[in-house]
Amino acid sequence: MKEKTNIRQLFSLAAEQNTFLKICAPMVRYSKLEFRSLVRTYGTDLAYTSMIMADSFCKSEKARLNEFTTNKDDTPLIAQFAANNTVDFLSASEMVYPYVDGVDLNCGCPQRWAMAEGYGSALLKTPELIADMLGTVRRNMPSSFSVSVKVRLLSSTNHKQTVDMCRQLESTGITFLTVHGRTAAEMTKVPVHREALQEIKQSLAIPMVANGDIFTLDDAEQMYSQTKCDGVMVARGILSNPALFAGHKTTPVECVKRWLNICQQADTDITYQCMHHHFSFMTESLLNKRLRLQLNNLSKEKQNVYDFISTHLPLDSVVDDNTFVHDYPPKIDCSYNDQIYRQRTAENGAGKDGGIVDGCAYDPEASDGNYFRSKREELDEPQAADDVAEEIDGVAFMDGGSLLFDE
């Protein structure tokens, strides 16, 4: 078991110092171990995993290996799960417990597939179900282990609805909650409703994290000043500039050099797609349009990207400070006990939450789980950038597919 960090104490310490926690958001496919390692060197206080389908995590060893990796330095860390029933959320939380400092329930994802199947923002219509999931996990986990939830505004005009819901969730005993300052229907071009965030914060006794429209450290400080929040979570801003919380207005060259070093040491643990997209985001302010186009169209070999970055950016001239650990810690070989989950599903009988998966007896080596079975193809399907911008509160990557959930 990894050494634990007490998330509640982190919030208390920040409050004593009249400041806020700086938090890297859960971004699908991109809040991976390697990226978390990078942003921690630039002032990030707390990092999340990518959103993980609890169904898959419970049912599939392949899903667990693909969706979650960690090392001894990867703390404070919260695993965020998408779940629509108590059995999946509790079981996934128990299984990941040895390796994280808390778990978070995603009630903010606005993507159509998620909402159609009762995940993400769809749960906001049933706060009683959210409360049941949170309360059950809270009662079954150690008090020092963080349990939290991420929600959106229920209305952009009637703040009382969201306040009442947040108070209901607070009563379950959760450690803190995060609020994205838009409704599920609002696009990123709609400014975050900071007055709503301020009102929600004033109504709660537990810490509240504010999320949305943070692209610089100044933005984060203004959010803290206006809303009196206890933490500020960043998604798109930190993806483009991992050094955001250190006060850099744009990505410094040394940050790109650090990312190159991490990727080379991670080797096969990081995919080409993940490595390449991060370079593309980070270098947007460092390369001209012609070079960015060349970078985005390189053949799919990691060394080609490394050579391109080394050729077109002055990495050799960068003198990094001593605060960055250049030896990348190896992954922890995580093992999971799924016996309790098997027992629960057997007690519930066959079906959606039962011991029968796709007509076969439960087999963690054979089943791919809900995400792998029915979501991968949809997430990978290329979409026109204009369509993405109109319908999803997030950003499209340069290849037109692989969506980022900006919650």
Image: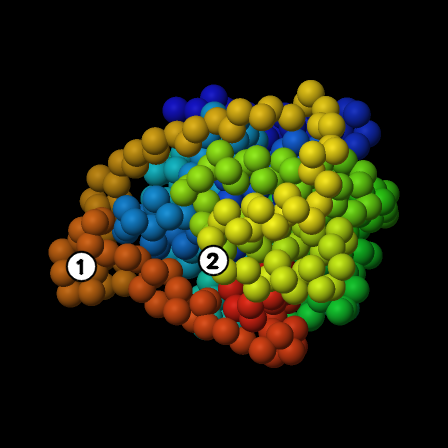
Determine whether 357 is above or below 326 in the image: below
Q: Tell me which amino acid carries mark 1.
A: Ile
Taking 39 as reference, is 5 left or right?
Answer: left
Residue at image location 79% in from the left, 25% down from the top: 17
Q: Tell me which amino acid carries mark 2.
A: Lys
- In the rendered image, residue 255, in percent from the top left (x then y), is placed at 68, 39
Residue at image location 71% in from the left, 45% down from the top: 313
Point out which mark residue 356 bears: 1
Taking 135 as reference, is 195 left or right?
Answer: right
Q: Which residue is mark 2?
A: 300
Q: Secondary structure at mark 2?
A: loop
Q: Is residue 145 visible?
A: no
Viewer-proximal residue among 329 and 112: 329
Q: Residues within 10 Å of mark 2 (few under 14, many from 20)?
A: few
- In the rendered image, residue 13, in percent from the top left (x then y), is placed at 71, 25
Sequence-earlier tag: 2 or 1: 2
Q: CA distance from mark 2 to mark 1?
A: 39 Å
- In the rendered image, residue 87, in percent from the top left (x then y), is placed at 34, 50
User: Residue 136 appears in which quarter of the rendering?
Assistant: top left
Q: Secondary structure at mark 1?
A: strand
Viewer-proximal residue among 72 and 354: 72
* Nearer the camera: disc 2 or disc 1: 2
- In the rendered image, residue 77, in percent from the top left (x then y), is placed at 53, 35
